[in-house]
Image: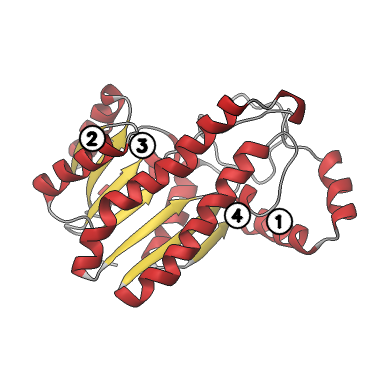
């Protein structure tokens, strides 16, 4: 893929995976729109990109606010032109035992991880359809494949966005729009910082960013990594329930 002058919108761009992917794309020549809630952090990333000779725009907005996301998209299009690629990355984690689940807590996870993705997609999709080109990418998780202990809200939210994007792919591919679902494993980001449980095959965020960008360039329909953990997860998908339950309870990755 030729990145020069491509316009990319990345949500959750101020830290973690979003930050690393943004820097990787900017190094390759893309013009980046950075969307997140904190403008001060976004401006730091913009300065980092511009210091390397790239171009970027800070778009302070909350993905749970559909109107704010649309306004940010409009501002980006005015500055850089039509959006070629959306990376719906903004997300929150949650570790909650079943007995401590609360409606407000689950709603918060879904508001960011699912409705935030919907708000981002709907803000760009019509212009992509009109142009008959573009690419939608969502950062889901290997946790989307099966439920994990103390992760009901998080696993459910990631399963939802994976299914959402699979449906979008079926609708949009005939119209010239590519759809990519990224299923990462454990990555060193603020979401995993301070975790006491052992995180198998933990990746550095810069390594993860290069893998994600590589999958985007190849326009993969789905990409799960690291391969070791992705293989174990796929084996878990075909396990009988009694065996999966026995293994999962004894190897909880949540404190």
Task: Please tell me which residue lies in front, 185 or 123.
Answer: 123
Location of residue 93 with respect to 23 vertically, above or below: above
Task: Please tell me which residue lies in front, 16 or 112.
Answer: 112
**Which residue in the protein does label 3 denote?**
63
Residue 38: percent from left, percent from top: 31, 24
| Tag 1–tag 4 contact (CB < 8 Å) | no
| Tag 2–tag 1 contact (CB < 8 Å) | no
How packed is label 4: few (under 14 Cα within 10 Å), some, or many (20 or more)? Answer: many
Residue 3: percent from left, percent from top: 24, 60
How much space separates mark 3 and mark 4, taking CA atoms?
A: 28 Å
Secondary structure beneath disc 1?
A: helix
**Which residue in the protein does label 2 denote?**
59
Q: Which residue is drawn at 19% across and 41% down?
A: 56
| Tag 1–tag 3 contact (CB < 8 Å) | no
Query: Nearer the N terminus, badge 1 or badge 3?
Result: 3
Location of residue 45 with respect to 158 vertically, above or below: above
How much space separates mark 2 and mark 4, taking CA atoms?
A: 31 Å
Secondary structure beneath disc 2?
A: strand
Q: Which residue is drawn at 38% across and 37% down?
A: 12
Query: Nearer the N terminus, badge 3 or badge 4?
Result: 3
């Amino acid at each position: 893929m030729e990145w020069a002058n491509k316009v990319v919108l990345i949500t959750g761009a101020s830290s973690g995976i979003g930050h690393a992917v943004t820097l990787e794309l900017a190094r390759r020549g893309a013009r980046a729109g950075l969307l997140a809630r904190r403008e001060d952090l976004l401006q730091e990333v913009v300065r980092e990109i511009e210091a390397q000779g790239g171009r970027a725009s800070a778009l302070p907005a909350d993905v749970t606010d559909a109107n704010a996301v649309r306004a940010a998209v409009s501002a980006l299009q005015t500055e850089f032109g039509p959006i070629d690629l959306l990376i719906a990355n903004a997300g929150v984690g949650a570790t909650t035992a079943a007995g401590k689940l609360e409606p407000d807590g689950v709603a918060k996870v879904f508001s960011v991880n699912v409705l935030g993705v919907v708000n981002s997609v709907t803000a760009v999709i019509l212009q992509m359809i009109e142009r008959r080109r573009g690419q939608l990418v969502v950062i889901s998780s290997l946790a989307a494949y099966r439920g994990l202990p103390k992760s009901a809200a998080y696993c459910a939210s990631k399963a939802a966005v994976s299914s959402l994007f699979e449906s979008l792919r079926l609708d949009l591919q005939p119209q010239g729009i590519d759809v990519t679902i990224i299923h990462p494993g454990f990555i060193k980001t603020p979401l995993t910082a301070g975790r006491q449980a052992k995180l198998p095959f933990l990746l550095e965020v810069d390594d993860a960013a290069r893998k994600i960008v590589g999958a985007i360039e190849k326009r993969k329909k789905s990409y799960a990594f690291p391969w070791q953990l992705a293989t174990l997860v796929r084996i878990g998908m075909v396990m009988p329930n009694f065996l999966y339950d026995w293994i999962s309870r004894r190897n909880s990755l949540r404190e």
